[in-house]
Amino acid sequence: MSSIAIRLAEVDSRIRSAEQHYNRPPGSVQLLAVSKTRPAADIREALAAGQHRFGESYLQEALEKIGQLRDLQIEWHFIGRIQSNKTRDIAENFQWVHSLESHKHARRLNEQRPRKLAPLNICLQIQVDTEDTKGGITPDQARNLIAEFKELPRLRLCGLMTLPAPVQGVENQRIAFHRLRLLRDQLKSPESSLETLSMGMTGDLEAAVAEGATIVRVGTAIFGPRNPKGEHGR
Ligand SMILES: *Cc1c(COP(=O)(O)O)cnc(C)c1O
């Protein structure tokens, strides 16, 4: 087995143990492999090991890899900051966006989503703790944005995402994830059940599973540490 295949199996077993430990139904947590800064060859390796969902944060880099891997069955998730002049590329190339933060971007993605593709799956990125400098909207802003979705038929509102500031210890890590789940319970409605909770990364996925994550976004534990110079912004 390749080292990526071995690490994927380890991450999978962390997720399954956490599901069991916290009484989550088996298989209720999906793994999104975060491949930002990684070459297409690493994605091919993960794909060969059975991983089909990949998350990217930097659009230009993502588009290059999507082009190189066009022939393969991959579900692409955009998890980075959205820039207004880049929404068309997102609408045309991804199946999911986890990081929606504005009405303006919602309307643009809706207009630009090609008719021949299924509606674009969306999570709203929420800021659940005040030290969090990594973006996200407030609960009130989320409530207003959700109300717009009935006019956005090319988008499918799936749920909420958060990227809390890193803290040590499962109990401390659970606080932010717990807040996201409570917010979801407050905001859900018959029109939109907000089933998806996109939360948890390499360092805190167990805490996220404990609090109801349905998608964990894991990079380092699968692909190894990133070169910080390769990261811009996030
Ligand atoms: C980079 C990134 C991740 C993955 O983080 P790791 O700690 O490497 O697992 C998850 N979510 C977002 C939004 C990211 O930018």
Image: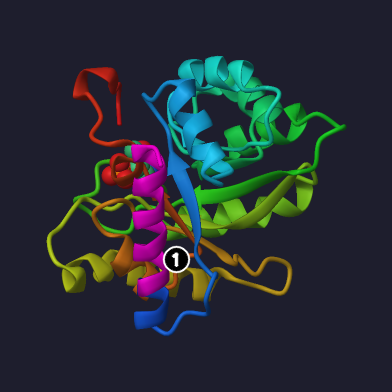
Dominant secondary structure (helix, strand or loop) of the stretch shown in magenta: helix
Pointer 1: residues within 10 angstroms few (<14), some, or many (20+)? Answer: many
Quarter of the figure with the C terminus: top left
Is 78 in front, or is 3?
3
Q: Position of residue 180 (x, y in %)?
A: 40, 66
- Tell me if residue 42 comes above or below residue 148 in the rendering: above
**What residue is disc 1 on?**
213
> What segment carries the magenta color?
1-17
Q: Position of residue 178 (x, y in %)?
A: 34, 72
Q: Secondary structure beneath disc 1?
A: loop
Query: Which residue is drawn at the image coordinates 31% and 67% (left, top)?
Result: 206
Q: Quadrant of ligand 1?
A: top left
Query: Which residue is drawn at the image coordinates 60% and 16% (left, top)?
Result: 68
Q: Position of residue 101 (x, y in %)?
A: 49, 42
Query: Which residue is drawn at the image coordinates 40% and 54% (left, top)?
Result: 9
Query: Which residue is drawn at the image coordinates 75% and 31% (left, top)?
Result: 113
In reply to whether residue 7 is colored magenta, the answer given is yes
Is 47 in front, or is 58?
47
Residue reaching furthest to the left: 168
- Colour pattern of the rendering: rainbow
Quarter of the figure with the N terminus: top left
Ligand 1 is within 8 Å of the C-beta of the residue at disc 1: no
In the picture, measured across the screen, residue 40 lies left or right of residue 145, that is left
Q: Amino acid at mark 1?
A: Ala
- Tell me if residue 56 comes above or below residue 179 in the rendering: above
In the picture, measured across the screen, residue 195 lies left or right of residue 149, that is left
Displayed quadrant of residue 15? bottom left
The answer to whether residue 140 is visible is yes
